[in-house]
Amino acid sequence: MEEKLIQQLEAAVAWLESLSIGSQSREIDGDAIAASTDPSIIAFDEFLTEYVGKVTAAAAKTGGQVQDVTNVLSDAFSVQKELLIKIKQTKKPDMVGLGEFLKPLNENLMKAISMTEGRRSDFFNHLKAVAESLTALAWIAYVGKDCGMSMPIAHVEESWQAAEFYNNKVLVEYRNKDSNHVEWARALKELYIPGLRNYVKSHYPLGPVWSATGSAASAPPKAPAPPKAPAPPPPPPSSLLSSESSQPSSSRPKEGMAAVFQEISSKPVTAGLRKVTDDMKTKNRADRAGFVSAGEKEVRASVPSVSKVGPPKFELLMGRKWVVENQIGKKDLLIDQCDSKQTVYIFGCKDSVLQIKGKVNNITVDKCTKVGVVFTDVVAACEIVNCNSVEVQCQGTAPTISVDNSAGCQLYLSKDSLEASITTAKSSEINVLVPASGPDNDLVEYALPQQYIHSYKNGQFVTTPVSHSGG
């Protein structure tokens, strides 16, 4: 009798639980349908069709790496749509929960960044333009003026400004060569300006609106790990949002270099130091002489260098691309048989001078130190990337000169190249020397500004270069 009563009670509880689960699932489905039919989501669908579709169609005409990185871009915008729908069903999370919430978007960004790493490909500027531009999607992480980022509209504009440097390189390189690449670059710009900027301005000017009654945004529950399971891999080095604990920094344990500095500062400065007596000083030691013997010098000279340098190259590939790589201490490098369809790529050279006689399409100086390049005419652009202490002289014409991530760059312009457009990014100590007005005068040197002042005036930021006065 008791067993039958227990069975009936269990059956009744199971029936009530099924009713409860069914009603909850119907409520969740209803919320999802309502969120997906919201006017802002419908507008985002139209935005994807118009702008992302245009970039995808242009990438299909070029194929290769351009299409691959465009597919990553398309996936990232599709993920943002899913997150916008979830935001309408989710309560506003803390910074840790927000970082976990944005993890799918961050994975697409990291995938695009990984495509720009390694040896520089012929489509490096395409890859870099997409990787830099995808940071604009982080506008969705804006949760207030104290979150450490610009407001959504300004964030989209700032992110595109960083990407436009590489996008312009694509336009210049393919302007007279391949209209499909030009179409792709223009479509990419329209995707963000005005596309994404106008969408954010119309629907989320103050950031996303989280649900007041929805579920909490939290990481999915983790299954218990089996015994002796390997430790999980570390998180990626960078992300759209740095998720830090809301715990005060003073109560959190120090990590990394912070822990080292804390340990150093907690001990007396002279702790652990030995007292140096007179007989221990070098000038008083009998076993030390003030010169280096010939035998010691020979031993030191015979130690091989630990730095690895690839084999030197100086050749014309496929009749289109001059490759000058790993030339060390060569002051007489010369290219005197070239035409306007060829490009020159200079990589990993040091203490060398290259002279290019004739007109070429493009010149790239990459990862070089103390290198001089003298050229006559260039059709597209002369690019200086990841260099240190280089001198570049244009004897004819050059429509564009770009300097990226370099320090100590001297540019010598001729009278015919004074109208050249000079673009700089993440670079310092850039000087431009131009001919003086008089025939017998020396060159006049101008230092390009590398510091700027940003002032908020009349509802917008005004940027002006810092003027240095000799003191």
Image (tube, rainbow, N blue to C red):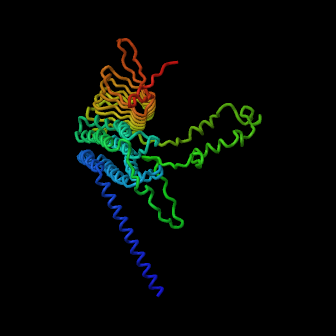
Q: Say left or right for 389 vs 187.
A: right
Q: Quadrant of residue 391?
A: top left
- The answer to whether 222 is drawn above or below residue 77 in the figure is below
Any part of residue 329 in sight: no
Toward the viewer: 282 or 363?
363
Position of residue 218 in the picture relative to residue 195 (left or right): right
Tell me where residue 42 appears, x and y as whole percent: 27, 50
Relative image position of residue 43 (x, y in whole percent): 27, 47
Q: Tell whether 198 sits left or right of 249.
A: left
Estimate the x, y position of residue 2 in percent, counting from the top left: 48, 86
Is residue 426 at least partly visible in the picture? yes
Q: Residue furthest bottom?
A: 1
- Which picture quadrant has residue 144? top left
Residue 42, above or below 399: below
- Residue 393 occupies quadrant: top left
Residue at 40% of width from left, 40% of height from top? 151
Report the residue at 50% width, 48% height from top.
244
In this view of the protein, which residue sits in the foreground, 431 or 240? 240
Furthest residue in direction right, as rendered = 278
Seen from the viewer's position, the closer of residues 253 and 318 is 253
Residue 289 location in percent, x, y? 70, 33
Q: How many tags in the picture?
A: 0
Work out whether residue 386 or residue 76 is closer to the camera in this orientation and state it. 76
